C-alpha cells in the first residue's frame, strides 16, 4: 500500500461540486477523516479564502499518530488566483506543493503567466526549471475542482477542462455517473456521484479510479471520496464543515 498516495489523493479529490449560478461559498473549510480498509490513517483539509483581489486554496494532508511512527506524512499545497478574472475560483496565478511522505520530500512551484501562454515550473529540490506552453484557461488540479463545482452536473454528461498537473498539461474529463442516498455527518442526504479522470504523479499512482459523492442540492458539498490504491481503496469522509458567509 502506498500511504503517501492515500493521503495526498484525498486532498486532490475533496473539492468538487455545486450547481451553475450558486453563490460561491467563501470562506469555507472542509475536514475529512482518511481511512484504508476501515482503519483511520489521517486527516485532510481543504480551505478557500479571499484577501483583496487574491483567492487562495490551501490543502493539507497529515498522517495520524500511529501511522506517523513509521511513515510520517505532512503535505501542504497552496494555490492562488486572480478572483476577478475567469470563472470561479479565478485565473490561476501561483501553485506551491510542499510534501513530506516517509523519507521523501518534494517542493515544487508553478507560476502561471497566462497572458504569455506559459507556466514556469520549478523543482526546488532538484533545481529543475521548465517553461510549459499552456492554453489561456489552464488551471491547477485543486482549482479545477472548484471550477467544476459551479457547473451543471447532470447524470450521463461529462465536462472537460485544461489542467496543469506538475509538468504535464492535459485535457481532463469529469463524468457525472449517478445519484445515490448516503448517510453523512450532515444526516441522510441525496448525492450525485462524479468521476474525475485524473492521473496525478505521486498521487493516484496511475490507478485513475476516483469517485466523489456530492450533496444533491445547491451547496453540492463533497461528503465522501474514494480512490483505489495498490491494495484496496482509501475513503475520505467529511467530518466537519465551516460554511462561507
Image (tube, helix red, strand yellow):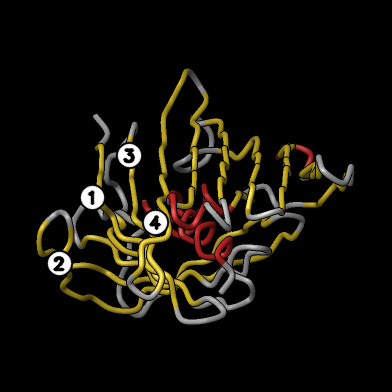
- Residue at point 56% right, 51% down? 73
Q: Secondary structure at mark 3?
A: loop
**Structural distance between the alpha carbons of marks 3 and 2:** 25 Å
Q: Position of residue 188 (x, y in %)?
A: 10, 64
The mark nearer the N terminus, 4 or 2, is 4
Q: Which dot marks residue 219?
A: 1
The mark nearer the N terminus, 3 or 1, is 3
Q: Is residue 211 above or below residue 113?
A: below
**Structural distance between the alpha carbons of marks 1 and 2:** 17 Å
The mark nearer the N terminus, 4 or 3, is 4
> Which of the two marks, 1 or 2, is nearer to us in this view?
2
The residue pinned by badge 2 equals 183
Q: Position of residue 37 (x, y in %)?
A: 38, 75
The mark nearer the N terminus, 3 or 2, is 3
- Residue at point 49% right, 43% down? 59
> Which of the two marks, 3 or 2, is nearer to us in this view?
2
Dot 2 alpha-carbon crowd within 10 angstroms: few under 14, some 14 to 19, many 20 or more: few
CB-based contact (under 8 Å), mark 3 and mark 1: no
Answer left or right for 171 relative to 240. Answer: right
Q: Secondary structure at mark 1?
A: loop
Q: Position of residue 114 (x, y in %)?
A: 70, 40
Closer to us: 233 or 137: 233
Q: Which dot marks residue 24?
A: 3
Q: In the rendered image, which quarter contains the C terminus?
A: top left
- Residue at point 48% right, 54% down? 11
Q: Secondary structure at mark 4?
A: loop
**Structural distance between the alpha carbons of marks 4 and 1:** 11 Å
Asked if residue 104 can be seen in this view, the reply is yes
Closer to us: 166 or 118: 166
The mark nearer the N terminus, 1 or 2, is 2
The residue pinned by badge 4 equals 16
Q: Is residue 107 above or below residue 170?
A: above
Amino acid at each position: 500500500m502506498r500511504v503517501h498516495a492515500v493521503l495526498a489523493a484525498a486532498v486532490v479529490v475533496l473539492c468538487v461540486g455545486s450547481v451553475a449560478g450558486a453563490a460561491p461559498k467563501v470562506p469555507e473549510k472542509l475536514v475529512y477523516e482518511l481511512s484504508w480498509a476501515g482503519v483511520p490513517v489521517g486527516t485532510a483539509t481543504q480551505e478557500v479564502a479571499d484577501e483583496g483581489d487574491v483567492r487562495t486554496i490551501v490543502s493539507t494532508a497529515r498522517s495520524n499518530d500511529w501511522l506517523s511512527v513509521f511513515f510520517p506524512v505532512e503535505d501542504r499545497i497552496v494555490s492562488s488566483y486572480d478572483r476577478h478574472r475567469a470563472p470561479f475560483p479565478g485565473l490561476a496565478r501561483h501553485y506551491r506543493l510542499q510534501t513530506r511522505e516517509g523519507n521523501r520530500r518534494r517542493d515544487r512551484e508553478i507560476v502561471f503567466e497566462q497572458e504569455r501562454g506559459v507556466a514556469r515550473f520549478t523543482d526546488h529540490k532538484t533545481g529543475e526549471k521548465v517553461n510549459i506552453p499552456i492554453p489561456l484557461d489552464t488551471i491547477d488540479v485543486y482549482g479545477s475542482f472548484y471550477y467544476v463545482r459551479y457547473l451543471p452536473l447532470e447524470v450521463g454528461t461529462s465536462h472537460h477542462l485544461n489542467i496543469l498537473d506538475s509538468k504535464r498539461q492535459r485535457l481532463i474529463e469529469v463524468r457525472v455517473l449517478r445519484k445515490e442516498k448516503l448517510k453523512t455527518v450532515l444526516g441522510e442526504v441525496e448525492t450525485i456521484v462524479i468521476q474525475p479522470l485524473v492521473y496525478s504523479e505521486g498521487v493516484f499512482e496511475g490507478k485513475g479510479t476516483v469517485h466523489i459523492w456530492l450533496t444533491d442540492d445547491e451547496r453540492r458539498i463533497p461528503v465522501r471520496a474514494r480512490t483505489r490504491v495498490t491494495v484496496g481503496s482509501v475513503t475520505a469522509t467529511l467530518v466537519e464543515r465551516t460554511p462561507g458567509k
